[in-house]
Amino acid sequence: MVGVSRSVDDLLTPPLTLRQLMWLRFRRHKMALFGVAMLILLVIYSFGGAFFFSEAYANTTNTKMRLQPPMAGHPFGTDTVGRDILARTIYGGQISLIIGLTAALVETIIGVLVGALAGYYGGLLDSVLMRVTEAMLSVPQLFLLIVMAKFFGGQIPDLTVMGRTFSGSVIVIISIIGVTSWMYLARIVRAEFLSLKENEFVLAARAIGTPRWQIIFQHILPNSIAPIIVSATLGVAGAIGTEAYISFLGMGVRPPTATWGNMLDGAYNYIETAPWLWIFPGMLIVLTVLSINFVGDGLRDALDPRSRAT
């Protein structure tokens, strides 16, 4: 009788929706939940901190206070020209996060378009696009980033948006990272399209005369969204890390715009004598990249149709 009652209850219980199944799978991933919480705190820190410190204060120099260790007035200490590191990490975090999100968006748009066109049409177009993709993969990304950043770095003037002045190098870095990071996503999307374009729902859409662009963007692409979301999420972490790396080499975002990456530029001269110069921006970069990677792992498990919800 107990077994019968359980089976009846199972029949009466409505099935879980896809969104509910995704949430059940995601919340099993404790590190992903930690990553979400940490990202929320980092966003609050970077954007909410602007209500307490102005950008003018973050850029104010005071050589009398240079290289001061953390103290009551400057919890993160001061840098080589006396600027408050706490305020600069706040405004630097805004730019680093914006660069990461925007560069990942550029990467996703290019990768999805190239992969979708190559996978759906095949033939000559597929061959040409994949050869271009392989050619891009054969060029070392760091070398290409340094060369392009050096060439285009001073070409774009500073921009003023909503009262804030941004170095023109921000646009250059976003474009370079996005243009040099789409190849792996394009290959993933191409593989998804190759496996889905012969399915019954696509053949039925073709049979009734559905335009090709609708088949690509309204039928096949939504069914390929899982790997795209995961790749885009991890792309944000990759873009933040890449920006920090080339800024550390002096080829990234230029003053007056602060980022966590260019705050590390020059700190290597004070690794032992003034460790607060690199500890705080470095810690924020590590926490951000780790949190995004945790979220990406959780999304990968949540969007995996072979994963069990319980």
Image (spheres, rainbow, N blue to C red):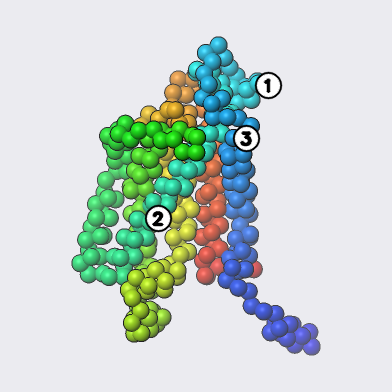
Lower position in the chain sequence, tag 1 or tag 2:
1
Lower position in the chain sequence, tag 3 or tag 1:
3
Q: How far apart, in angstroms, are the residues tagged by discs 1 and 2?
A: 44 Å
Residue farthest to the top?
A: 64
Dot label at residue 51: 3
- Could you tell me which quadrant the C terminus lies in? bottom right
Circle 1 SS class = loop
Q: Which residue is mark 1?
A: 72
Q: How far apart, in angstroms, are the residues tagged by discs 2 and 3?
A: 32 Å
* Kind of residue indicated by mark 1: Ala
Q: Position of residue 234 (x, y in %)?
A: 47, 51
- Residue under the point 58% across and 43% down: 43
Q: Which residue is mark 2?
A: 108
Given this view, does label 3 or label 1 mark the residue nearer the observer?
3
Circle 3 SS class = helix
Q: Can see residue 275?
A: no
- Residue under the point 25% across and 60% down: 129
The reply, left or right, for residue 146 in relation to residue 77 is left
